[in-house]
Amino acid sequence: MSESIARTNYQLLQEFLACLERVYLVSLQTRQRYDSYLRLLLLWAGGAILEQANLIEPTFPQFLVAHVGQNSQEPLSASTLRKATQLARRFFCLGLRCLSGPIPRDRGELDRNHQDAGP
């Protein structure tokens, strides 16, 4: 994992957050919370491009478990681990599609698209 953060990753995540605001009407407070979870994704990816996340070692969940919180020496809480992982999954399943094509309007459509994509 690199010390630097790829600018394109930051831009992708900002566009994803804007998409969530615009399409799913995510509030400013929620966007700010999401921003803190996505910051962990940026730290994990470092200089690697998120579109090639399958090549990054350790995996994002492994990174989260080993990561120590900013203001303490304690590991991240279980709630933070779960929410950061869920939001990362949402970015990879929906975010890249949201930025490049038609946007699923509901969870059922997202699930159907994911099943159609196969493993």
Image: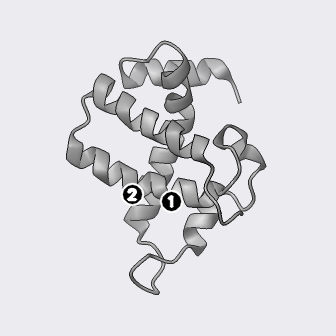
Which class describes the residues within 10 Å of circle 1: few (<14), some (14-19), or many (20+)?
some
**Residue position marked by numbered label 1 in the rendering:** 40
Kindly identify the residue that appears in the image at 60 percent across and 74 percent down: 66
The quarter of the displayed image where residue 2 is located: bottom right
Q: Which amino acid does label 2 sit on?
A: Ser
Which class describes the residues within 10 Å of circle 2: few (<14), some (14-19), or many (20+)?
few
By what rule are the colours in the image chosen?
A: one colour
Kindly identify the residue that appears in the image at 50 percent across and 29 percent down: 94
The quarter of the displayed image where residue 61 is located: bottom right
Label number found at residue 63: none
Q: Nearer the viewer, residue 11 or 84?
A: 11
Q: In this view, does 17 lie above or below 62?
A: above
Q: Element at badge 2?
A: helix
Left or right of residue 111: residue 33: left
Tell me where residue 82 appears, x and y as whole percent: 44, 57
Q: Which amino acid does label 1 sit on?
A: Leu
Q: Is residue 10 above or below residue 104?
A: below
> What residue occupies the far bottom of the structure in this picture?
73
Q: Element at badge 1?
A: helix
**Residue position marked by numbered label 2 in the rendering:** 36
> What residue occupies the far top of the structure in this picture?
102
Question: Which quadrant holds the C terminus?
Answer: top right
Left or right of residue 96: residue 106: left
Kindly identify the residue that appears in the image at 44 percent across and 33 percent down: 15
Tell me where residue 54 appears, x and y as whole percent: 73, 45
Please report contact status of discs 1 and 2: CB closer than 8 Å, yes or no: yes
